[in-house]
Image (cartoon, rainbow, N blue to C red):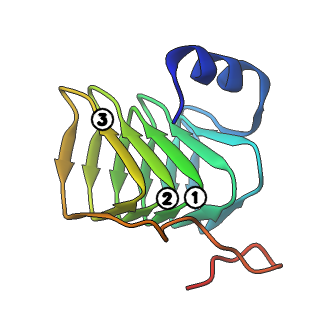
């Protein structure tokens, strides 16, 4: 999982895609390796092999299927990832399937959780998640 120092390093150096505050993206988003940060709004599913940071003002209305996710904002949908961190002030309404989960005091989580060793994201050569 991302430690504070590790997260700061990744955030400042490896963000490949940024959906900025005030931006609304409608449709499914496929992310590549590296980090994607959402400070705006995504209406659709987010899939891929990279890491995802949902900023304090960020929101996703759709399912998330990524390698790792750190949530400061809001997700309305299911999460499937190798690891997930719900930070204080975040909100997740949906089921979570992960290998590792961290929920800070002050985070809101409404859903079912499954700890599964096989929850690592697998994608096809086109970048689409496979089941």
CA–CA distance in space, label 3 to label 1? 18 Å
Q: Are marks 2 and 1 in contact (CB under 8 Å)?
A: yes
| Mark 3 neighbour class, 10 Å CA radius: few under 14, some 14 to 19, many 20 or more | many
Residue 69 x %, y %: 50, 45
Q: Quadrant of the C terminus?
A: bottom right
CA–CA distance in space, label 2 to label 3? 17 Å
Q: Is residue 119 above or below residue 90?
A: below
Please report the residue visible at 51 percent of the width from the left and 23 percent of the height from the top.
3
Nearer to the camera, 5 or 70: 5
Identify the mark nearer the N-term, 3 or 1.
1
Please report the residue visible at 40 percent of the width from the left and 39 percent of the height from the top.
85
| Mark 2 neighbour class, 10 Å CA radius: few under 14, some 14 to 19, many 20 or more | many
Residue 31 x %, y %: 71, 57
Residue where numbered disc 1 is placed: 66
Residue where numbered disc 3 is placed: 90
Relative horizontal placement of residue 55, taking residue 104 as reference (left or right) = right
Relative horizontal placement of residue 80, taking residue 88 as reference (left or right) = right
Please report the residue visible at 18 percent of the width from the left and 27 percent of the height from the top.
106
Q: Is residue 75 above or below residue 18?
A: below
Residue where numbered disc 2 is placed: 81
Give SS at disc 3.
loop
Q: Is residue 24 above or below residue 131?
A: above
Q: Are marks 2 and 3 in contact (CB under 8 Å)?
A: no
Quadrant of the image occupied by residue 76:
bottom left
């Amino acid at each position: 999982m991302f430690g504070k120092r590790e997260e700061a390093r990744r955030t400042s150096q490896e963000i490949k895609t940024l959906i900025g505050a005030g931006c609304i993206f409608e449709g499914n988003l496929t992310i590549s390796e590296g980090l994607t940060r959402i400070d705006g709004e995504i209406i659709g599913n987010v899939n891929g092999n990279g890491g995802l940071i949902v900023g304090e003002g960020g929101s996703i209305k759709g399912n998330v299927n990524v390698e790792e996710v750190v949530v400061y904002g809001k997700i309305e949908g299911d999460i499937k990832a190798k690891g997930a961190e719900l930070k204080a002030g975040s909100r997740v309404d949906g089921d979570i399937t992960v290998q590792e989960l961290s929920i800070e005091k002050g985070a809101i989580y409404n859903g079912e959780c499954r700890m599964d060793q096989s929850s690592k994201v697998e994608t096809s050569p086109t970048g689409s998640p496979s089941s």
